[in-house]
Image (spheres, helix red, strand yellow):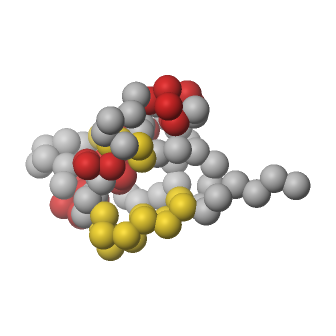
């Protein structure tokens, strides 16, 4: 079932439609939150919009440490793995 799930959960259910859309192999019934986020980031989509805090995609030549966002090291993907046609990042605004 689709929904909004906490990263604190041990497992997120994977339905057949979600598995098909995200390219998750048949028979997988749950993913950890980190695995689900990585699957979403690597799904073939037209647009990836990141409007919040966090660095989820990096250059393949960069180590995770270059992103300066240790919280998302477990879910970050290389840009070469992101199957997206267009990306839009909202820059953080400090005031």
Give the image location of residue 37, x and y in percent.
40, 45
Q: What number of labels is visible?
A: 0
Q: Going by the image, does 58 lie left or right of 6?
A: left
Give the image location of residue 48, x and y in percent.
42, 64
Toward the viewer: 34 or 2? 34
**Residue that appears at 58% across and 45% down:** 54
Q: Quadrant of the C terminus?
A: bottom right
Q: Going by the image, does 46 lie left or right of 19?
A: right
Q: Quadrant of residue 12?
A: top left
Looking at this view, name the residue that lies furthest to the left. 26
Judge whether 4 appears above or below 66 on screen.
below
Looking at this view, name the residue that lies furthest to the right. 95
**Residue that appears at 81% across and 53% down:** 94
Q: Quadrant of residue 64?
A: top left
Q: Quadrant of the N terminus?
A: bottom left
On the question of residue 5 being in view, the answer is: yes
Looking at this view, name the residue that lies furthest to the bottom. 46
Toward the viewer: 21 or 74? 74
Judge whether 37 appears above or below 87 on screen.
above
Toward the viewer: 89 or 39? 89
Give the image location of residue 80, x and y in percent.
26, 49
**Residue that appears at 76% across and 57% down:** 93
On the question of residue 13 being in view, the answer is: no
Give the image location of residue 55, x and y in percent.
52, 44
**Residue that appears at 19% across and 60% down:** 20
Judge whether 80 appears above or below 64 on screen.
below
């Amino acid at each position: 079932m689709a929904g909004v799930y906490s990263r604190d959960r041990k497992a997120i259910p994977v339905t057949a439609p979600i598995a098909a859309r995200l390219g998750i192999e048949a028979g997988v019934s749950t993913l950890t939150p980190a695995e689900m986020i990585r699957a979403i980031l690597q799904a073939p989509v037209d647009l990836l919009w990141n409007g919040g805090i966090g660095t989820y995609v990096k250059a393949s030549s960069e180590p995770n440490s270059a992103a300066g966002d240790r919280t998302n090291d477990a879910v970050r993907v290389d840009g070469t793995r992101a199957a997206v046609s267009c990306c839009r990042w909202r820059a953080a605004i400090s005031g």
